[in-house]
Amino acid sequence: MIKHHLHPEILLSYAAGNTSSSESLIVASHITVCSKCRREVETFEKLGGKLLEESDSVDVNASSLDSIMSKISDHVSVDNASDVVSTNAVFKNIPSVLRKYLPDGSNLTENWSKGIGGIKYFDIDLGNSNQNTRARMLSIPPGKKLPHHGHESQELTLVIQGGFSDENGSYDVGDVAIEDEKNIHTPISDSKEGCICLVVYEGNLKFKGPLGPILNFLKI
Amino acid sequence: MFLENTFETANLSAKMSYINYKQDKTYKVLKPAVKDEELTNLIGLVATKKDKTAFSNLFKLVGPRIKGYLMKLGSNDIVAEDLLQEVMLTVWRKSETFDRSKAAVSTWLFTIARNKRIDMLRKEIRPQLDPMDPMLTPNEEESADDAYGSKQESLKITDAINLLPDEQSILIKMTYYEDKSHSMIAEELKMPLGTVKSRIRLASTRLKKLLEGNIHD
Ligand SMILES: [Zn+2]
């Protein structure tokens, strides 16, 4: 049962179509497993539909219909060849919207980068270098306590496998932790399974070098 | 600005029609120009028979409104026509994915138009929910009675938006009509990001109640 949800304002933005790519990724991944938030998104899409319905009509150029009728006549049904999703068993329990951004391997984290303390991470390339939110997968070994840390800006964490807990509660698969400037916390990963999560955060990288990404992630 | 000029009168008339609505339950605030059932039938013909006449009729019925919506969002005539063609091609190709038990035609068209806009304007593929994902959890039971398409009249949603406090409605308009992210809104209105988020949160909760109320009443 999912206990920690996304806030309605990000669900509304997702439905309206103006979340960044990395925010869209975490929303789409969460609503795959959370019917409550999915229903909210559907409600906000319905709102969009109503706004479309209530828009003023604008005359369409006569040639548009001809043009589209000729396009559909030529159209041979080739559907979504680009959407090839790996069926590798290591990806089971990963929402398919997320799966297609992750590297293949004999286990989920095989081709992720190695950080300090057994932590592994993988930066997801969403082809959106001009946007100021980023998406990173993080794998934390069992029973690991992360240093007490704060956040410069909003950070969303979706638990994919295992879980973690901090001063605010415990987070299991499908739960979203929302951290912002006001939060300072000391997360501890699940003692048996550790934690694999998707983290979406705002801001620029400040630390360079091999430890950079982890230092940046922890903002220490 | 455009919003401010038209705002007072729009807000007033929205409040008036809401009052009428409250006083007389039969007051018809919104008469959709086209019946949802008619559109659903046309999409059904396209899906099952690849019926070009039905598709052409569908285009004539929904095209002008989709174009109007895209232009309201800031596309010029040429871009709106291009986008409209993309939207309608997707309607042709994906007609069998339309499920009237899940969404109204207008909602389905909205999501297609939204995605095409993002693909074209941002030149990126938006990560989004895969409706065929085996991981998808079942819907909550209460949503089973959402016969969206069957409801022909409801409180006009643009009026509902205008019924929100000004400070909230402007943020909803900027989200849907100007395609602005929270941080863009914060910058433009010189407002802390946290305030933008909390106001949109309040507004979305109220709109959600209104929309969900409409479904069940
Ligand atoms: Zn949720």
Image: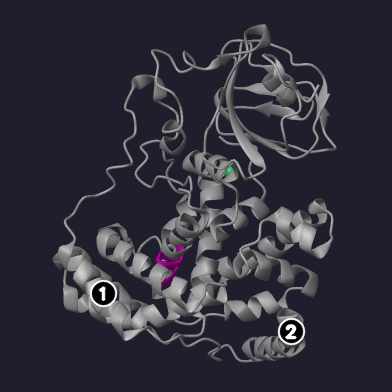
| Res B22 → quadrant | bottom right
* The N terminus of chain A: image quadrant: top right
Confirm or reject: label 1 Cβ below 8 Å from ligand 1: no
* Residue A183 forms part of the magenta stretch: no
Name the residue carrying label 2.
B7
Q: Residue at x 79, y 70 (%)?
A: B167
Where residue A201 appears, as percent x and y from the top left, is: 68, 36
Q: Residue at x 73, y 73 (%)?
A: B164
Q: Residue at x 36, y 37 (%)?
A: B134
* Residue B110 forms part of the magenta stretch: yes
Against A71, residue B122 (above or below) is: above
Where residue B82 appears, as percent x and y from the top left, is: 39, 70
Which residue is more in the foreground, A50 or A52? Answer: A52
Q: How is the image coloured?
A: one colour
Name the residue carrying label 1.
A67
Frontmost of labels 2 and 1 is 1
Marker disc for residue B109:
none
Residue type beneath disc 2: Phe
Stretch in magenta: B105-111
Which residue is more in the foreground, A99 or B23? Answer: A99
